[in-house]
Amino acid sequence: MTGRDRLPTAVLLAFGLVALEEARKLRFGSIARPGPGFFPVVLAAAFSLVCLVLLVGAVRGRGEDAPAAAGLGWPKIVAAMAALFAYALVLEVVGFVAATFALLLFFFRALERQRWPLALAGSLVTALLTYLVFKVWLHVQLPAGPGGG
Amino acid sequence: MDLLHGLTYGLAVSLQPGNLAACFVGVFVGTLIGVLPGIGPVATMSLLLPITFTMSPTASIIMMAGIYYGAMYGGSTTSILVNIPGEAASVVTCIDGYQMARQGRAGPALGISAMGSFIAGTFSVVGIMLLAPPLTSIALRFGPPEIFGLLLLGFTMVTYLTAGSKLKAVAMALLGLLLGTVGLDPISARPRFTYGSVTLADGLGLVPIIMGLFGVSEVLLNIGAGVEQEVFHTRIRGLLPSREDWKRSAGPIARGSVLGFLLGILPGIGAIIPTFISYALEKRLARQPERFGHGAIEGVAGPEAANNAATGGSMIPLLTIGFAPNVVMAVLLGAFLIHGVQPGPLLIKEHPDIFWGVIASMYVGNAMLLILNLPLIGLWVQLLRVPYGILFPLILIFCVIGVYSESSNVWDIVVMLAFGVLGLLMKRFGFEAAPLVLAFVLGRMAEESIRQALIMSGGRFSILLTRPLATVFVAAALIVVVLPVALPPVKRLLRTVPVD
């Protein structure tokens, strides 16, 4: 555990404490007749305790080292994530085929820098093919758009 | 029903056209995703779960199991040819397998891993047949304290056997349990942590969590790291290992099979750990340990046998107790429940077709894999040449389809994406996902069993220590915690686990 661990363990500890506070609002019951709050309170308390120990270790800068992560291309990851969240939000509004086409176009063109004709064709074919395979052939539920597809 | 009768009955079930087709699809898809890095059996099984809705329970489970052991075959191909583990259980195979490939011996490496896997897979099927029925009768005596003791052992094992920080693994297991309490309280049906949301009232879904932690996060990591796959370009000739290869591999395959099978039964182990232990064991037993790391065929044969045998062993707790010893079995448990079948001690009586059919299908599937794998290696190599830029959007779309089709709820996609981000951060900071998911799955069972046990005993935790079976489990959990400290050799054996 190194200084790198301070932020994540502090965030986890904060989460544990909030969870503990929220869990305490549930009826605890007694040890002989545990209520709905019993398990969450015990868990949140134990979780917070473990996170506290981790945090203390991280601040003191000792303990086991986390495996070193390779340099990550954060801009690309953030762009992909943002596209995916947007995709989830419009999926039921515009339908599976249209949303998937737009998402794939973004991936192929903006992230992977394929040429326009290739990106357009690839996105269209993939969106239609997945629709045909999953919806028409395998009868899997997919979000319908204004045109029913 | 005696064993022979059970097996012939099972073979008859597994050879029915529908079940045979399910088995084929399972092992084929399993090998495929095993070959492809970045998508493993857990995500795939979750993805295909909705497709099984229209299938019979037997065919569904046969297909799901096929994906798991199929992935074990496929994963080694990528390890040997590309030096990237196609699947986590094939990490060790990279060490000597890739070296063999570089020395022009890719063929024998692929051959011995396929045949070693076949031998081990077959061995573990025989093991299941012999062990499952007697274990079933023990499992019938399980009450809440025994179940809680077993879960405690499972959590302890899974956290103490992770590669990184144990304390972080404990934190993740607790987080998983905590996330599992979202939704309605299993006993009083009161809502907990739902904040008026309909999506949360049903609890967080297993499929979105798994797809997020194992699928989306892996893809994000690869996008960020910009993976370039260097496929081995020499032609692969002569898949058949030589007589000398067999002589070297026989022992490792036999030991790997037994080791993998026995370890696989234990909660929390899964298929990955036995491969590391098998590698360490073979290196220790070898006359020339210095050959390891430079293309020793023993280092491929042993671990490959071990991971296949472990997949079989881990079926035992699921089929006999209804307990998921690892994440993959947790998904399989989900598949059982979706089809209205409760795996456990009554399975063999109430659904003999599923019990024996699934076991027999694993024989059939292993044979299929051997036939499928050797000639198709050329195809898998081609597949590895598909650039990641084309592959990753497809994987993401499949994850979305898998999650949406299970619940028809767009918010589950959001949950998946959120867990994708969480998974990425966890990988970045050295937190393991496996303890979280396993604890999430078993959390409900853990809560019910401890609360019932406390009600039974009038609030005395000592009930866990006064019933023999429960005591055994709790004691075993304690030993797991104490053993690595008390026994340095064991610790050293576990430490030889090479963490990249």
Image (cartoon, rainbow, N blue to C red):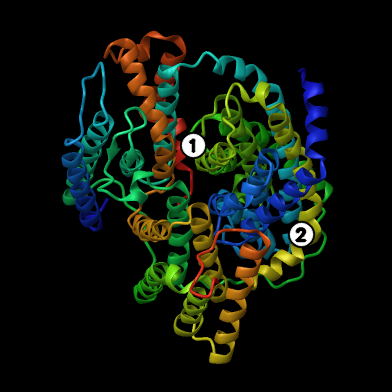
Q: Residue at x 45, y 46 (%)?
A: B206
Picture coordinates of residue B98, whole percent (x, y): 63, 60
Above or below, A54 relative to B442? below
**Of the pair B307 and A109, the residue shown nearer to us:** A109
Q: In which quadrant will I find the N terminus of chain B? A: top right
Q: Position of residue B345 (x, y in %)?
A: 59, 21
Instruction: Describe residue B27's horizontal placement relative to residue B50 as left or right.
Output: right
**Figure check: B262 above or below B270:** above
Q: Earlier in the sequence, mark 2 or mark 1?
A: 2
**Secondary structure state at the residue bearing disc 1:** helix
Residue for badge 1: B493
- The answer to whether any part of residue B286 appears in the image is no
Q: Chain of mark 2?
A: B
Report x, y in % for residue B171: 30, 42
Within 10 Å of disc 2 (Cα), the crowding (few <14, some 14-19, many 20+) is: many
- Please give the label number shown on residue B137: none
- Name the image quarter holding residue B450: top left
According to the picture, the residue beneath numbered tag 2 turns out to be B107
Q: Amino acid at mark 2?
A: Gly
Horizontal and vertical percent position of residue B453: 36, 17
